Image: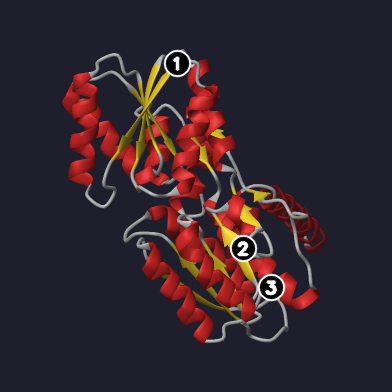
Amino acid sequence: MARFRTWVGIALAGALSVSLAACSSTGGKRAEDARKAAAAQGRAAVNTPRWTFAMITHSGDGDTFWDIVQSGAKQAAVKDNINFLYSHDDEAQQQAQLVDAAVDKKVDGIIVTLAKPDAMKAAVARAEKAGIPVITVNSGSEESKAFGALTHIGQDETIAGEAVGDELNKRGKKKALCVLHEQGNVGHEQRCDGVAKTFRGTLRKLYVNGTNMPDVQSAIEAKLQADTSIDSVVTLGAPYADTAVKARTDAGSKAEIDTFDLNAKVAASLKDGTLGFAVDQQPYLQGYQAVDLLWLYKYNGDVLGGGKPVLTGPQIITKDQASALAEYTERGTR
């Protein structure tokens, strides 16, 4: 009887080990990864000094795109033992003043967007003069090197626009409306101009006040009502896609709504067919890489890009890819 019990015990132990091995390759492994990630929260992976990096963007209030950028930057900051400071203002002069304030604080590195480069040039120059390394992200790729930044991280807006034009051609579209929600933003102009470069149909620009969503909706609706031949509306930011959908409904239009940028709402709308496609520039990666590259520069003198921008996009996301990315958009990293 004792021998029988011994063999039963061995058999049960073997079965249990097989079961655990099977789990570790699927749900069990994911659970273990999640446990390790949770355990690592707040712990630096390096022993370098606790440098302070400041990120200053042209974001307005409530823009989910910049929440994703911050998510990446904060994660890298934890890993790299960085004290991360974030500030923003959609008025260029105020954004420049925030850069000046970061210089006055004698931060160890600055990450900045150049949506309106002329207004930012002097502030960036002041940072350079103070010996503070600067990396530009998201907008201003053409001005970044001239302004003295180490590198630029983001997508080439013209190339992204060209990709949209190509996609519209594939879908057989003939007349598109490109909605610009921030006048004076060079990146937005480059996007629409890029679409026009490759799109074989007719493209019209529509300038709206992006800080007033009811006005945005009314302006798009009026255009769709006035011209029923418009078969595609391209918005330049994820929050504006949903507004364009509402405008389409109220106008009784059948135009396809497409957008730049990705978030959970856009992913869901792609899955159910409310939106046609989205252009992802991977904002999480922009924030993460910017902090990580500043750390690498401070620690090891490393620079990426070889004088060229480090591209994070574009990637065309359709209904087919939306399901696979849904869990990442829900956690705020895509």
Q: Nearer the viewer, residue 117 or 287?
A: 117
Using the rendered image of the protein, determine whether residue 166 is visible from the camera's viewpoint: yes
Rate crowding at label 1 as few (under 14), some (14 to 19) or many (20 or more) other CA atoms within 10 Å. some
Q: Residue at x 82, y 60 (%)?
A: 3
- Decide: is 33 above or below 236: below
Drawn side of residue 276 relative to residue 300, left or right: left
Please provide percent x and percent y for residue 91: 35, 62
- What kind of residue is marked 1? Gly
Rate crowding at label 3 as few (under 14), some (14 to 19) or many (20 or more) other CA atoms within 10 Å. many
Drawn side of residue 268 relative to residue 72, left or right: left
Q: Residue at x 32, y 61 (%)?
A: 61
- What kind of residue is marked 2? Phe
Label whose residue precedes the other's in the sequence (2 or 3): 2
Label whose residue precedes the other's in the sequence (2 or 1): 2
- The residue indicated by pointer 2 is 147
Q: Nearer the viewer, mark 2 or mark 1?
A: 2
Rate crowding at label 2 as few (under 14), some (14 to 19) or many (20 or more) other CA atoms within 10 Å. some
Using the rendered image of the protein, determine whether residue 39 is visible from the camera's viewpoint: no
Please provide percent x and percent y for residue 130: 62, 82
Q: Nearer the viewer, residue 184 or 320?
A: 184
Label whose residue precedes the other's in the sequence (3 or 1): 1
- The residue indicated by pointer 3 is 295
- Decide: is 186 above or below 227: below
Drawn side of residue 74 relative to residue 9, left or right: left
- The residue indicated by pointer 1 is 201
Q: Nearer the viewer, mark 3 or mark 1?
A: 1
Q: Secondary structure at mark 3?
A: helix
